[in-house]
Image (tube, rainbow, N blue to C red):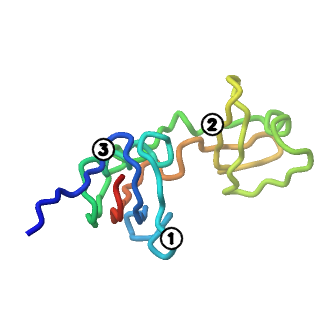
Amino acid sequence: MSNLSQAVVGEGTHLTLHYRLAAEDGTDLITTFDGNPATLQLGTGQLAPFLEACLLGLTEGTHQTFSLAPEQAFGARNPELVRRLSREMLDRNSVPGEDYVIGDLVEFAAPSGGQFAGVLREIDAETALFDFNHPLAGQSVRFEVQIIGVL
């Protein structure tokens, strides 16, 4: 019998894994199971913090699926993040002649110099309605992982 302990995922760990993030109905949002596994380091922003939290304490060889409620994942939908903007503001922040379609993800420059994005929900000659919630806000998700290697 071998007395070797299995490597455990911890803060800052480098690991190789397959992962799948799926909607509650099972629709894949992203998966590595049909290709090469991912190699990453925890704590560097390669995975969302709530996904990294699921990995902590897992051992090499673990294959597990987590069901995450909206509050554990991308958060609840915030009605305050659905905003109507003037067409003037939209035109000022976009490429000249841009033709928008409902469902487009549009990026805006933040006053701080960063970027934020919203999904176009309605548009007319005067205004445009954007939803600045994360596209998965308010949804439960499933996170499946298979830990291949832990360094």
Residue 130 placement, left or right of 22: right
Tell me the SS state at disc 1: loop
Relative height, residue 112 to residue 21 (above, below): above
Q: Label 2 to label 3, Cα distance in Å?
A: 40 Å
As drawn, the label of residue 82 is none
Nearest the eye: 14 or 135: 14
Q: Quadrant of the N terminus?
A: bottom left
Residue at 80% x, 33% y is: 89
Q: Which residue is mark 3?
A: 10
Residue at 70 percent across and 55 percent down: it is: 104
Q: Amino acid at mark 2?
A: Arg
Label drawn at residue 83: 2
Please give the label number shown on residue 36: 1
Outermost residue to the top: 112
Counting from the top left corner in percent of width and height, residue 136 is at 48, 52
- CB within 8 Å, label 2 to label 3: no
Q: Earlier in the sequence, mark 1 or mark 3?
A: 3
Callout 3 amino acid: Gly
- Marked residue nearer the N-terminal end (2 or 1): 1
**Residue 54 in view here:** yes
Residue at x-position 32% and y-position 45%: 53
Residues at marks 2 and 1, CA–CA distance in whole angstroms: 40 Å
Determine if residue 144 is in view: no
Q: In the visual, does 118 lie left or right of 94? A: left
Vertical position of residue 141 compared to residue 57: above or below: below
Residue 22's quadrant in the figure? bottom left
